């Protein structure tokens, strides 16, 4: 059971994305179909992510143009991936259901790391939003992203995320509004207790609670 306690570790740094939204960032009228134009598989993943109370935001892989809900302009004007990026990364808005899906997938694929972090959305020099996200990433330049997407799609189909099955339809028909609320998915009391426990230097306590839950994200 996941409950209120996260099972995935936190990345050791935040992520920053520079986007060129066609409309206001907080309003999206095609959160599913815009991804289906990139590929049928991404459209299906975007639909199931919304059912799981999440949202497929962004994906970048070596040698390919970044895709996702946040970069629809790449359909018309592809932007070449960064020269400094040689791996794979996929970003979802946080939800407990989506965290469970990626947690299960990480147990299947040893060549991909999954964690939680904060994502800053920029439009030129303006900070548009800062949201909590889930990241699946690999530093392997030969990472098979197509196989990963197939496994992710299968995992999402077998998960218990059908409660919001009608949400993608209404999001496409009437528009989708996104917004971030501080600590919307965390228990602040538990967070403070964990922070205090982590700050203790006693070896006995460290053995009981384990190491600091952080992962390296040097390749992203």
Image (tube, grey):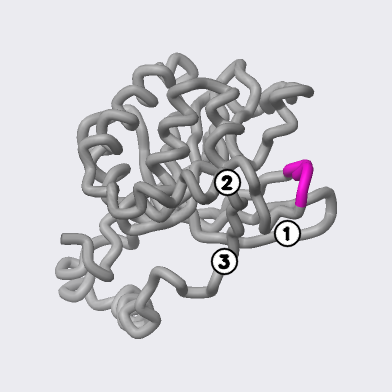
Distance between the Cα atoms at labels 1 and 2?
25 Å
Which quadrant is the C terminus positioned in?
Answer: top right
Picture quadrant of residue 57: top right
Residue 86 position (above or below residue 135): above
Distance from Cα at disc 3 to Cα at disc 1 = 11 Å
Give the image location of residue 219, x and y in percent: 53, 34
Q: Examine the residues drawn in magenta and state their main secondary structure.
A: loop
**Relative vertical location of residue 7 with respect to residue 191 in this rendering, above or below:** above
The residue tagged 3 is 180
Q: Nearer the viewer, residue 96 or 28?
A: 28
What secondary structure is found at the residue carrying circle 1? strand
Q: Is 80 located above or below residue 4 in the figure?
A: above
Q: Nearer the viewer, mark 2 or mark 3?
A: 2
Give the labeled residue for mark 2: 173
What is the quadrant of residue 53 in the picture? bottom left
Going from N to C along the chain, the mark reached first, 1 or 2, is 1
Magenta segment, which residues? 19-23
* Tag nearer the camera, 1 or 2: 2
Residue beneath disc 1: 128
Is residue 53 magenta-colored? no
- Disc 1 crowd rating (10 Å Cα; few below 14, some 14-19, many 20+) is some
Tally of marks? 3
- Residue 93 visible in the current orientation: yes
Sequence-wise, the earlier of marks 3 and 1 is: 1
Quadrant containing the N terminus is bottom left
Task: Specify which label sits upstream in the sequence, 2 or 3.
Answer: 2
């Amino acid at each position: 059971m996941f409950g209120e306690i996260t099972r995935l570790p936190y990345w050791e740094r935040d992520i920053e994305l520079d986007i060129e939204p066609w409309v206001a960032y907080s309003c999206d009228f095609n959160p599913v179909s815009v991804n289906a134009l990139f590929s049928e598989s991404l459209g299906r993943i975007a639909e199931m992510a919304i059912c799981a109370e999440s949202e497929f935001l962004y994906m970048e892989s070596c040698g390919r143009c970044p895709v996702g809900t946040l970069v629809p302009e790449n359909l018309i004007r592809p932007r070449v991936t960064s020269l400094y990026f040689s791996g794979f990364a996929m970003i979802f808005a946080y939800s407990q259901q989506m965290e469970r899906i990626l947690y299960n997938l990480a147990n299947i694929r040893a060549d991909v790391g999954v964690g939680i972090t904060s994502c800053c959305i920029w439009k030129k020099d303006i900070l548009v939003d800062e949201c909590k996200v889930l990241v699946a990433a690999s530093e392997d330049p030969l990472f098979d992203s197509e196989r990963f997407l197939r496994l992710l799609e299968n995992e999402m189909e077998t998960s218990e995320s059908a409660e919001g099955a009608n949400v993608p339809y209404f999001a496409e028909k009437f528009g989708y509004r996104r917004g971030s609320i501080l600590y919307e998915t965390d228990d602040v009391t538990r967070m403070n207790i964990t922070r205090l426990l982590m700050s203790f230097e006693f070896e006995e306590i460290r053995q009981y609670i384990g190491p600091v839950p952080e992962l390296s994200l040097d390749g992203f």
